[in-house]
Image: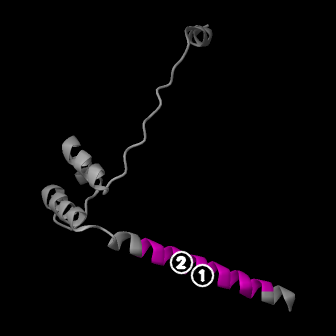
Amino acid sequence: MKRILVAVMAILCATTLVANAQSASKTKKSKLTAEQKALQKEMLAKYDTNKNGKLDKTEKAAISKEDKDKMIKAGLLKEPKKKAAAHTTGASTSAAAQ
């Protein structure tokens, strides 16, 4: 009996977590300002070459740096993470060569 109760409680908790996650993602999209919506519509019109209403990988790759900067400033894109340059010392490279 205890196993059944534990299983039912686990299912209810999982269902609640999924429902909360879905509602949080829906509210996140609807909180765009009028300026953000206008910029998003402008970028979609400019770069959506196949006119399907979405930007695929090749269309996203075609976005100019200036337009990416505009979208980052408006809060539509996250700033790209800076890639740390791998610094190697002369000793480690010469040891690897030997």
- Give the residues drawn in magenta, as a range: 6-26
Q: Dot 2 lies on which element? A: helix
Q: Residue furthest bottom?
A: 1
In front of the other: 83 or 60: 83
How packed is label 1: few (under 14 Cα within 10 Å), some, or many (20 or more)?
A: few
Residue under label 1: 16
Q: Position of residue 88 (x, y in %)?
A: 54, 17
Q: In what element is the residue under mark 1?
A: helix
Which residue: 62% across, 9% down? Answer: 95
State the quadrant of the N terminus: bottom right
* Residue topped by disc 2: 20
Which sits in the foreground, 40 or 36?
Answer: 36
The image shows residue 90 at horizontal and vertical percentages of 55, 8
Q: Amino acid at mark 2?
A: Asn
Q: State how far apart marks 2 and 1 are (Cα).
A: 6 Å
**Majority secondary structure in the magenta region:** helix
Q: Are marks 2 and 1 in contact (CB under 8 Å)?
A: yes
Quarter of the view holding residue 27? bottom left
Residue 50 placement (x, y as % from top left): 17, 62
Q: Is residue 12 left or right of residue 88?
A: right
Q: Position of residue 9 (x, y in %)?
A: 73, 85
Q: Is residue 18 left or right of residue 80?
A: right
Q: Is residue 21 magenta?
A: yes
- In the image, taking residue 87 as reference, residue 49 lies left or right, namely left
For residue 26, the mark is none
**Crowd band around label 2 with a 10 angstrom C-alpha radius: few (<14), some (14–19), many (20+):** few
